[in-house]
Amino acid sequence: MTAPLEELEQRLGVDFANRDLLRCALTHPSWTEENGGESYQRLEFLGDSVLGFVVADLMYSRFPGKAEGELTQMKWALVCGSALASVGRSLLLGSYIRVGRGASHDGQRDSVLEACFEAVVGAVFLDAGLQMARDFIIRSLGDRLDEQALSTASVVNPKGELQELAQAKALGLPAYRITSTEGAGHELVFSAEVMVGESVLGTGSGTSKQSAEREAALAALARLAPKRRPGR
C-alpha cells in the first residue's frame, strides 16, 4: 500500500488543484501494464525541461562571475541521475510510488526515484505554473544550491560518464575532435567538440587537448541530462 497523497503534498509544500497529476507522476509503467492508465513518463519528459530551465536560470543569475564551463559542471552536479535520486529519496517519494506486482522493489531504485522527481516537477508546473514549479525546485534542492557545495561539485570522469550515458541511450560512442588551436607557446588554447552519431553534442576549450575534451564532455552531459535508461 502506498501512503496517502495528502501527506506528500505537505512534504512537497504544494496543494494540488488536480491531484490526479501528482498520482500520475508517481505511477510506474509496471502499474499501468497491470491496471491501465498513464505512467509518469510523459510528465517526466516535461519535468526534465522545466527542471533544466530553472536550474540553468538559477546558475546564471546567482553566479555572474562563473564561466560557461563552470556553470555547466554545476548544473550537471545538480541534475545528474544520482543527484535527483537523492532528492527523491529525501522527499520519501518511494513510499508513494505505485508499482506493479512484478516490480515491487522498483520504487526504491535510483532511476525510478529520479524519474518520479522529474515527473512531480512536471505535475507542479501543469497544476500551478512556472513560478510554483521554480519555488518547489529550489525548496527540494535545498543546500545543494549552496555556493560552496556547487563550487566543489565535480564530475570525476566526464568522458567516461558520457560514454556510459550514450551507450545506455543507444546513441553510439562519442567521438572527439580538436576544432582549433589559438595562441602560442604556453598560452595555447584548444577548442574541442564531441559528436555522437551525426550530432555535435558539446563544445569546450582549455589549455590542453584533454581539458578541452573534458569541457566538451561536460557540455554534452548537461545537454543529455537527466539520464534515461531503457526499462525505466
Image: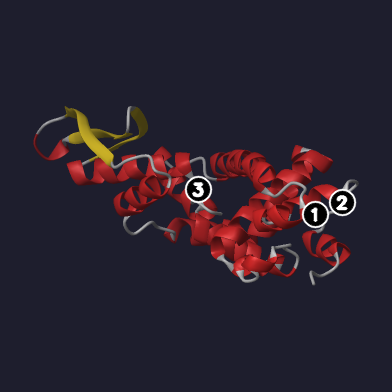
Q: Number of labelled discs?
A: 3
Is 202 drawn above or below residue 102 in the view shown?
above
Residues 146 and 91: in front is 91
Q: Which residue is mark 3?
A: 75
| Residue placed furthest toward the left | 185
Is 62 drawn above or below residue 35 in the view shown?
above
Q: Position of residue 203 (x, y in %)?
A: 33, 34
Residues 136 and 48: in front is 48
Q: Are marks 2 and 1 in contact (CB under 8 Å)?
A: yes
Check disc 3: other Cα within 10 Å, few if <14, some if 14-19, many if 20+: many
The reply, left or right, for residue 104 in relation to residue 199 is right
Residues at marks 2 and 1, CA–CA distance in whole angstroms: 6 Å
Q: Position of residue 22 (x, y in %)?
A: 79, 52
Q: Quadrant of the C terminus?
A: bottom right
Q: Earlier in the sequence, mark 2 or mark 3?
A: 2
Q: Quadrant of the N terminus?
A: bottom right
Residue type at numbered disc 3: Lys
Q: Which mark is residue 19?
A: 2
Q: Earlier in the sequence, mark 3 or mark 1?
A: 1
Residues 227 and 28: in front is 28
Residues at marks 2 and 3, CA–CA distance in whole angstroms: 30 Å
Q: Position of residue 8 (x, y in %)?
A: 81, 64
Question: What residue is shown at x 51% (from left), y 56% (from top)?
Answer: 81
| Residue placed furthest toward the right | 17
Question: What residue is shown at x 26% (from left), y 40% (from top)?
Answer: 212
Q: Position of residue 214 (x, y in %)?
A: 29, 46
Dot 1: element: helix
Residue type at numbered disc 2: Arg
Question: What residue is shown at x 65% (from left), y 60% (from top)?
Answer: 142
- Specify the quadrant of the image occupied by residue 59: top right
Q: Which residue is mark 1?
A: 23
- Specify the quadrant of the image occupied by residue 175: top left
